[in-house]
Image: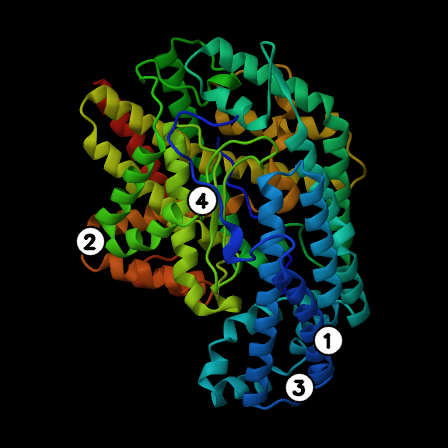
Amino acid sequence: MITTRVQPLADAKAEGAAPFGALPEWDLSDLYPAPDAPELARDFETLERDAARFAADYEGKLAGLDAAGMLECVRRYERIDMIAGRLMSYAGLRYYQNTTDPARAKAMSDAQDQVTAATTPLVFFSLEINRIDDAALDALFAADAELARFRPIFERLRAMRPHQLSDELERFLHDQSSVGAAAWNRLFDETLAGMSFDVNGEALSLEPTLNLMTDPDRGRREAAARALAAGFQDKLRLFARVHNTLSKEKQIEDRWRKMPTPQHARHLANHVEPEVVQALRDAVVAAYPRLSHRYYALKARWLGLDKLQIWDRNAPLPIEPAKKIDWPTARAMVSESLAGFSPQLAELAEPFFDRGWIDAGVKPGKAPGAFAHPTVSDVHPYIMLNYMGKPRDVMTLAHELGHGVHQRLAAGQGELLSATPLTLAETASVFGEMLTFRTLLDRAATDAERKTLLAGKVEDMLNTVIRQIAFYDFECKLHAARAGGELTPDDINALWMSVQADSLGPAFEFMDGYETFWAYVPHFVHSPFYVYAYAFGDGLVNALYAVYEDAPEGFEAKYIDMLRAGGSRHHRELLAPFGLDATDPDFWDRGLSMIARLIDEIEAIEG
């Protein structure tokens, strides 16, 4: 519902102008012409005025509305939500282009304060909706088909009924949000963006340093890893303070809301049952030996090592040619892969390249990682990359473009229904990656090239599934431990290491300093327990892709229909046309089996 949209969720993977061709930059004028544009000031005034009028017209009266009155109420709320979303999207995107620019940081902070203050009068809406009798609400839906279209919104709000606080407390939490978690999020972001890592005498920011962890030269990989460890250690007390504060804040709010577990709020937001997430987690953990442990043992052998170090995890294979992929080639690869599956999806992707909807270059102060920000349903998404010309960067482009196309298709649902739960939001992105991968694999000219591609895909899938579930277990342990008191940096380090050996396996030994690598993962700070959505999405897409390979006839239409649904249907409804059910224990094994088959293919090449 009303959201400040400050943090586009980063899909973190991988200075200055690079030799990749002309890299696109954002043109944010589709949101507002300039930071001082009169339209911006006008919308802040409109937001404040419309929110106050909405409260004056409806507060204390929702239970007495008829179907037509409730529909008009929802539509007015949706229009207000869109204004707030446009304002914060613009402020947030400008900020993420250069998080070290004080003027942009101030503009975002001021926008957040203004939007929070303006929308405080709207807090009553969800509270009153949750007090309406079930039978009365059902009667309203039965009386008006257009109102019934918004039923999923009401159901999501009412899922919070057992956890709803008093009207006064809900207003207080809304009011103080900009100086609570959001302020700690900013501190985290600005600290990371301002960090410099000394790699053999060269000062690098976070993205280029992380990028060196995939360098063909093992010495450079090690130097980067040790530089990261030294940098994180230097700021470790601050990062521990951020995590302690946010975990405690969450613990307090969860206690007041009577949340049964720290994870429960995320499950509610994702519209997914806790037992489904637990089934996913258990299936992945059970698969560690046959997936990550098995693969990394093979990789140690390929690299001629008795043990892998952490800087070898994403190392290129010795047979992998050192090559950079320029931007026009990356664009062509991804566009052709989409077009081969669906000309409609390729057409929806085209404007991202030509109209300033992608910001691709690595620049000082720019936020690390990559994301696709949906903005609002009457504009379009914006994609951020830190493109450095590696094959993985091409896959990241495919991933984020999948998000962007998904968001464009879902926009037809309107502002309130277009947002897709995180568990389903990864569907088109991971599917887009798979299409690009299959295109590249089909074009492989030699066994060595094929092996390189397969290994890269397996590693991406291990990073998406195994690593993210290990992250999820770390968060579960972190929040459970924080409930017992303040955690020292060493306490958090120990929790991190407790999941690393289990997930990566006996092929690894860990350097001193790796215990601090929890410090830079943004999801732990911005979106607690978000990370399992990656594994959910990958498993779901693997199962979907298996259906596509088995029966391609008619798949495209069903797939596009699923993307177009946005957040208007539950995952059970969306998967049913494909004969899939995420509550079936075999569902996750089916997705994990695809990773195992890719490892089988690599071994078959070796003979």
User: What's under tag 3, amino acid-wise?
Assistant: Ala
Relative vertical location of residue 81 with respect to residue 185 in this rendering, above or below: below
Residue 515 on image: x %, y % = 64, 23
As helix, strand or loop, the secondary structure at mark 2 comes to loop
Looking at the image, how many numbered discs can be counted on the residues?
4
Q: CA distance from mark 1 to mark 3?
A: 19 Å
Relative vertical location of residue 35 with respect to residue 282 in this rendering, above or below: below
Q: Please report whichever mark, 4 or 2, sits nearer to the chain's N-terminal start.
A: 4
Q: CA distance from mark 1 to mark 2?
A: 54 Å
Viewer-side label of 3, 4: 4
User: What's under tag 4, amino acid-wise?
Assistant: Ile
Q: Residue at x 74, y 43 (%)?
A: 184
User: What's under tag 2, amino acid-wise?
Assistant: Ala
Near-viewer residue (510 or 562): 562
As helix, strand or loop, the secondary structure at mark 3 comes to helix
Q: Please report whichever mark, 1 or 3, sits nearer to the chain's N-terminal start.
A: 1
As helix, strand or loop, the secondary structure at mark 4 comes to strand
Q: Which residue is mark 2?
A: 551
Q: Residue at x 34, y 57 (%)?
A: 580
Residue count near mark 1 (Cα–Cα under 10 Å), binned few <14, some 14–19, many ≥20: some
As helix, strand or loop, the secondary structure at mark 1 comes to helix
Q: CA distance from mark 3 to mark 4?
A: 45 Å
